[in-house]
Image (cartoon, rainbow, N blue to C red):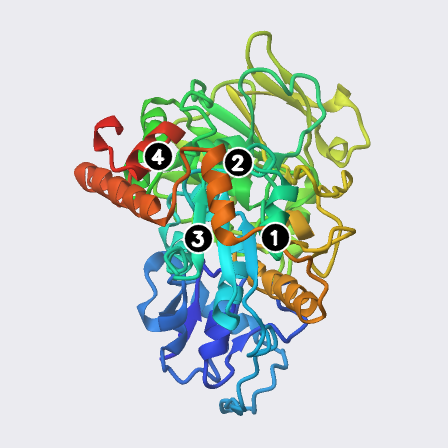
């Protein structure tokens, strides 16, 4: 019996490091690492030891013979990756690791004085950097987040029905109470303290602030009520405290989603899923109530190019096929769509739609009975139509989807909500240089250009690409650069000590949450979940979070 990696793979390669027979690929040393959608286990070499399953932070590894019905495709999918592929194994047998002396390439000399490093952002990028520093050096780490709760995109970006993926946060949470960590949640750089003040109290500062802004479409009507950025929608259903409970209205039967990446598919899945099934996750209470009361029955996914160029991953499309009571349809309005699907090879994205029904969809009336997701390729939005709110979206037809035609050959798709899922971009950090074109901070190996002692990691460093695991190698590069600078004497000496920064932070913001307060928030949310028969009910506003951190249950609703 061999093992297989499944949908929730985060690609952080923890499984690779514990595998005794080198059967998991691509490894961080191989060119394909970071380019594939997930990692794969070679069934010819797996020895059924289970080390990978034990080490996986997101519970993505299972014995092939024990895969649940919704995951059975992953046995053949893992095996298919290795067809006609050289991985270094001897034919017919495993390639055992040759274990040498451990090497700590990202470390400081034993006689080096501990350095103080501030990490701004507690999502995966920031926490991988903090983990690297805490495990490999004697550094003292100050964790800072503008929100009064830790987690970043693990808490507010992962879909609420992907509970296994959220377990990656448990790995990071063990560092929140590390004896060399001080936590300041609810402290915003640029509002409460400046980048200069932060630098004056630390040897180095690592910025892991992500890419919080959504890209715009640049079409008329984009700012109408009912036209919502997907980043707002994701934050809404994840109880982000900066997005109001009434930020999304689900009054119509049809929703148009511009984009066909994983965020677009997540949105579509949430909109048409059975609310009872969603209640088994940690979806925001207000979102769950809105979905139960709403009338959405159809989601249209617009893709400017064809199915061969779709941005989604295989695992997300496979997940849609297992939604109970939800039909998948390809709008066959352009002959290139069917041709691309029929001609696709086994590993091509277009091949994922080979078993999906194709029909020329009639958009003149309401959706048919039932719930469905419609893939409409070679089609782009031209205008959001409506006076007081979105009532329809004008889209291009056929060749117009490539941007070559105007709206003359297009059509209107009636819709009560337009979601713009066309990507994210970073925002300027006060005190740091910023590249408006790329939405990133200019850097060399993570070192901020022209600003000694300042570093970046994650999406603000490389742009909004890559999942959770991509941040491990990204953080390793940045931490390596930081430690090289420390050894070479290139870090500016801080003017103040650690206690001085704690006093400064408290003087600027009296509502700061520390590790003890974060534990109180955790207890409060789990208690609310137990009462509602759910794994967790997240507190959705800053006052609620701060009240819970102080142990004041009386001010928590419910």
Residue picked out by circle 4: 545
Residue picked out by circle 1: 205
Q: Earlier in the sequence, mark 3 or mark 1?
A: 3
Q: Are marks 2 and 4 in contact (CB under 8 Å)?
A: no
**Whether residue 150 is situated above or below residue 88 in the rendered picture:** above
Residue picked out by circle 2: 374
Q: Nearer the viewer, residue 34 or 291?
A: 34
Residue picked out by circle 3: 182
Q: Marks 2 and 4, Cα distance to the nearest angstrom?
A: 39 Å
- How crowded pointer 3 is (Cα within 10 Å; few <14, some 14-19, many 20+) is rated as some
Residue 214: mark in rendering? none
Q: Residue furthest top?
A: 387
Q: Position of residue 478 (x, y in %)?
A: 64, 61
Q: Position of residue 173 (x, y in %)?
A: 38, 56
From the image, state whether disc 4 or disc 1 is nearer to you.
1
Q: Marks 1 and 2, Cα distance to the nearest angstrom?
A: 46 Å
Q: Earlier in the sequence, mark 4 or mark 1?
A: 1
Q: Earlier in the sequence, mark 1 or mark 2?
A: 1
Helix, strand or loop at disc 2?
strand
- How crowded pointer 1 is (Cα within 10 Å; few <14, some 14-19, many 20+) is rated as many
From the image, state whether disc 1 or disc 2 is nearer to you.
1
Q: Residue at x 36, y 49 (%)?
A: 515
Quadrant of residue 529 within the rendered picture: top left
């Amino acid at each position: 019996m061999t093992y297989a990696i499944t949908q929730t793979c985060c690609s952080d390669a923890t499984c690779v490091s514990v595998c005794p027979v080198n059967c998991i690929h691509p490894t961080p040393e191989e060119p394909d690492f970071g380019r594939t959608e997930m990692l794969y286990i070679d069934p010819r070499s797996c020895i059924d030891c289970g080390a990978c399953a034990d080490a996986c932070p997101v519970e993505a590894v299972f014995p092939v013979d024990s895969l649940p019905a919704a995951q059975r495709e992953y046995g053949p999918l893992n095996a298919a990756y290795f067809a006609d592929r050289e991985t270094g194994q001897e034919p017919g047998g495993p390639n055992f690791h040759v274990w040498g002396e451990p090497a700590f390439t990202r470390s400081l000399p034993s006689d080096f004085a501990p350095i103080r490093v501030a990490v701004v952002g507690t999502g995966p990028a920031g926490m991988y950097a903090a983990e690297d520093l805490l495990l490999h050096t004697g550094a003292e780490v100050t964790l800072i987040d503008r929100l009064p709760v830790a987690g970043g995109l693990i808490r507010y970006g992962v879909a609420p029905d992907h509970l296994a993926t959220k377990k990656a946060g448990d790995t990071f949470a063990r560092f929140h109470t590390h004896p060399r960590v001080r936590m300041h949640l609810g402290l915003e750089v640029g509002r409460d303290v400046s980048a200069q003040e932060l630098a004056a109290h630390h040897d180095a500062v690592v910025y892991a602030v992500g890419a919080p802004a959504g890209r715009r479409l640049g079409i008329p009507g984009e700012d109408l009520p009912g036209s919502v950025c997907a980043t707002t929608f994701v934050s809404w259903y994840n109880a982000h405290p900066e997005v109001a409970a009434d930020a999304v209205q689900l009054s119509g039967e049809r929703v148009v989603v511009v984009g066909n990446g994983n965020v677009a598919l997540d949105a579509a899945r949430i909109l048409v899923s059975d609310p009872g099934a969603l209640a088994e996750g940690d979806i925001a209470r207000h979102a769950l109530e809105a979905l139960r009361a709403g009338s959405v029955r159809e989601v249209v996914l617009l893709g400017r190019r064809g199915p061969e160029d779709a941005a989604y991953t295989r695992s997300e499309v496979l997940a849609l096929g297992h939604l109970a009571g939800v039909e998948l349809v390809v709008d066959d309005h352009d002959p290139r769509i069917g041709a691309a699907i029929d001609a696709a090879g086994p590993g091509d994205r277009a091949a994922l739609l080979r078993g999906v029904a194709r029909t020329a969809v009639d958009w003149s009336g309401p959706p048919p009975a039932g719930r469905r997701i419609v893939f409409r390729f070679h089609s782009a939005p031209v205008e959001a139509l409506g006076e007081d709110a979105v009532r329809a979206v004008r889209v291009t037809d056929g060749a117009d989807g490539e941007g070559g035609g105007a709206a003359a050959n297009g059509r209107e798709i009636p819709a009560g909500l337009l979601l713009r899922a066309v990507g994210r971009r970073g925002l300027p950090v006060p005190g740091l240089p910023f590249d408006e074109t790329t939405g990133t901070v200019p850097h060399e190996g993570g070192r901020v250009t022209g600003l000694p002692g300042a570093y970046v990691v994650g999406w603000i460093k490389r742009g909004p690409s890559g999942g959770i695991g991509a941040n491990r190698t990204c953080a390793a590069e940045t931490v390596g650069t930081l430690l090289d600078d420390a050894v070479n004497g290139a870090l500016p000496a801080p003017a103040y000590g650690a206690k001085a920064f704690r006093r400064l932070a408290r003087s600027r913001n009296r509502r700061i949450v520390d590790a003890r307060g974060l534990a109180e928030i955790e207890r409060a949310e789990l208690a609310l979940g137990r009462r509602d028969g759910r794994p967790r009910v997240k507190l959705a506003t800053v006052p609620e979070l701060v009240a819970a951190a102080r142990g004041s249950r009386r001010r928590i609703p419910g």
